[in-house]
Image (cartoon, rainbow, N blue to C red):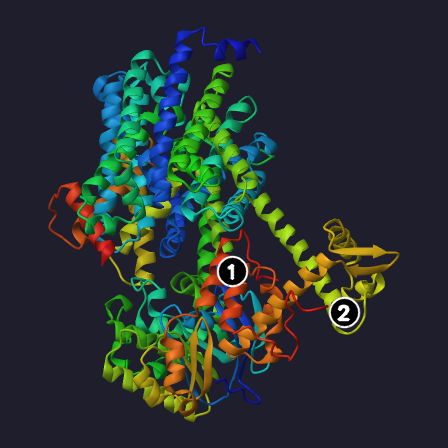
Amino acid sequence: MMTFDQNAFLIILTASLIAISCGLLGVFMMLRKMSMTGDAISHAVLPGIVIGFFVSGSQRGLEVIIGAGILGIIATLVIDWLRQKARVQLDASIGITFTLLFAIGIILINLLAYKVDLDQECVLYGEIAYLPIDLWISDSGFNFGPRITYLAVLNVTLVVAFITLLFKELSLTSFDENFSTVIGLPTKGINLALMSMVSYTTVSSFEAVGAILVVALLVVPPATAFLWTKKLMPLIQLTSALGIFIAITGYYCAYLVDSSIAGMMVAVSGVLFLGTVIIKGKKSNFTFELPWKKSRLALEDKTL
Amino acid sequence: MEDFLYFFTFQDSSIAFVVIGITLLGLGSAYVGTYSFLDKKALLGDAISHAVLPGICLGFMLAGEKNPIYIVSGAFFSGALATFLTSWIRNNTKLSEDAIIASILSIFFGFGVVLLTVIQKSGNPEMAGLNQFIFGNAIAILEEDLYIYGGLAILIIITLTVFQKEFSLLVFNPDFGIAVGYPMGLIRLIFNVLMILAVVIGIQAIGVVLMAALLITPGAAARFWTDRLHKLLIISGIFSVISGIAGTYISFILPQMPTGPWVVVCLSFLALFSFLFAPNKGVLSRTISRNKYLRKTHQDHLLKALHHAIEEGKKYLTIEEIYEAFPYQKQKNNKSIDDLIKNRLVTKNQNIIILTNEGKSESKRIVRLHRLWELYLNEYMNIAPDHVHDTAEKLEHILTPEMEALLEKRLNFPKLDPHQENIPRDYDDL
Amino acid sequence: MITQVDNPILEIHDLIVSYDQSPVLWNVDLSLPSGKLIGILGPNGAGKSTLIKAIMGLVKPSSGYVKIFDKTLEQVRSRISYVPQRESVDWNFPASVLDVVMMGTYGKLGLFKRPGKKEKDIALSCLDQVGMMSFVNRQISELSGGQQQRVFIARALAQEADLYLMDEPFAGVDMSTETAIFHLLQEMTAQGKTVIVVHHDIHSAMNYFDWMIMLNLHLVASGPNEKVMSEELLRKTYGGKLNLLTKVTDIIKQKDFNPLKN
């Protein structure tokens, strides 16, 4: 039975806000061809989150965000170190770094299980369904409402402010990094700021959607929207609209089959993405070709 | 300690099965992973390993239990679908490879999570077994699993060994392969199948989330020890097996611990060790050889200073004069003088430093190389005499005897450098 | 054949540049006069683009330095304009022609400020100069190679600089566009601007450039057009690399570190 009550509204609102924050940053990550770096960051912040939980005890607060922020920066530094000092190729540097940090995070969760209110499943796909009962109650006992919704509102505000303020810089560095260095923009600083926003957004959203599904919200809506438009502003708007649509549809589909809401949001975005590829792909009539013919074609493309 | 003996003496046959299983799958995935690392497709392995989750869940739902055949087939098909979609989308859209891989990875994982939670809420008592596929539990490998996982691993190892030539061609130069008539498309397809199989057999032990490490890290670490392909494969296999067994042991003594994360930590430790300490390519070794080289250059500069002194009619330099010539590096100067004395290139009497005969010949060689290169820069590269010194100052330390002979010939055994200074030869008196 | 000038607009002193520790430019030492149209010529892999990138601070030299207007690059950034190679960016980027040309004004605009009417007017007049007015709102993915090239030149014009460095601006451009762009560049130098262009066609080079730099891993020649256009220098430039130089490069490559670095 479909319902629309206050709880459903809160969950959809929060999920939409998270999807918008992720999508907005994801647009620039995609344009920089750094989607996999986003994936790596979202995995790599896990030990920081666990340590933050451990330090802060039951009060989840600033410690978690600081912990994750530090880990995000460490991950970027390790990737750079592997590339420049140890001369490991980029894809392998990313792969080694995030698997190691994620593994450490899982080990910490298991070691600190008695002390940390976090389980592996929460890490994987979060639990937005419990949002209405996870309330923010002040010391004097006043009930402000769901804690995660506040986090999402704060996150989306900061992301929108960040992108508005640095819109010109973000688009130029994404399009032509050399040129922006030449005209004297702090290209590295802007890049670092974007990575920090991605880590912060991952942490802020992870209780709701989990560390791995955050990646889907970062990557899939921008990639889908990119196939529909050639302009930057419409790309951003469409990404946000997709975020809202995914939240609503995902919630009700999850309700129907009784599954994880975050997982269903990703599944919905996946359907949209694959549908878009079929409609907007170079060969709009979908013909099934045998994969080995395909891969031979790919090889010939390379030769050209 | 008891645990340790119990584990490694294989008194328990189920432990023996587990160790055999982890050894085989470690070898198989390291083998495939090394090729994909060389092919610079490391992250495709990450995508495939996340993408097998929905297949595992579907296999579980169809079988109603943790049946290895259903699960392996399900995982294989969803891995294959993900690989196919990746290349199909790449050929049909303007999306960059990186965005495609990240999208496929997270979409498939999202579907997997949906199915996983559906199964969870259906209250199937076997559910606990399914959770192991996420972070791995090697201890749970049973005899019947071993036949399937081990069999597939052996299949991978044999195929890669038999077709080593073809796969090397695929990684190194596929266009050449096409040109000489190899069916490179088919070889790529077989390679992709092997990669998916490697992921499929690894998930029981390592789990879908961290499987990528077993494909990427061994190859990257082994690359620091050798430039030869077959050695590379052997070393990466060893790394992978050691980490696999260590991770299994830890999840044996700490039963609530998943295996995957520990395997990854062990692997990363071996990789870090390789990055730092491998001979020749390791960070430490490179730093040492650079420092050694810098020490050598400083010694060369001291010898040259003594040579110039003789050219100016002095027999020797006092140590104070050397300190003055190379200011602010007293310690370095002393160290270099000690080294030169040890090599019998100079002698030290009180505070007087004099070149020995060997020292004279060595200093002549360095000055000669310096001035030859200056002349070469001036004559062949049209560089003004007042601009040639700095480069020659660096090249004098690296020019080989073979290069010296070439320079002499090309410049026709010149007498004078661009500054009209004598180019000293061995037979010249100093 | 290297002509040095007094009061140079650009001075390169003993520049050595290496990529991954294999040296690609050896001892480049030259000075350039202002107000000239200057060509950089040389065969493939001669280090032409590397030289431009080193001047713009995009690659770090192993040794040597560059001075522009007798100052360091940081002090005069706003007076220099740069056209990168067309292939260096992804033209599928969601932007219009006007968006890209406006990027030329960002340097003077500074951080956080949004471009306004003034920047738009500059961009439009630059587009007019390269004859792309009718494409203002076109998406860049829909342009031909020559049009993309002109957009990049318009973006450089929008920087309103005194020194222009252009990396292969004529690659993939048809004859008539090439002529039009050359006339535009000549107009600019007539107004006292200095334009340095990486180019590969010797014939058009002879017709248009005032000054020529010939590279082949090292500097073969730098001087007024009529002085350097000799058969001997062309043979030195295009007649293969110096044997000893490639041998030394091989030795350096085999080291585990870069011995040329200070």
Q: Chain of mark 1?
A: B
Q: Chain of mark 2?
A: B
Label 1, on which residue?
Answer: B402
Disc 2 marks which amino acid? Answer: Ile
Q: Residue at x 37, y 71 (%)?
A: C240
Q: Position of residue B37 (x, y in %)?
A: 37, 41
Label 2, on which residue?
Answer: B310
Number of residues whose C-alpha sits closer than 10 Å to that of mark 2, classed few (under 14), some (14–19) or many (20 or more): some
Question: Helix, strand or loop at disc 1?
Answer: helix
Image: B345 above or below C213: above
In the drawing, does residue C68 fall left or right of residue B63?
right
Q: Earlier in the sequence, mark 1 or mark 2?
A: 2
Disc 1 marks which amino acid? Answer: Glu
Q: Position of residue C120 (x, y in %)?
A: 38, 78
Q: Position of residue B4 (x, y in %)?
A: 53, 13
In the drawing, does residue A246 fall left or right of residue B328?
left
Number of residues whose C-alpha sits closer than 10 Å to that of mark 1, classed few (under 14), some (14–19) or many (20 or more): few
Image: A260 above or below B120: below
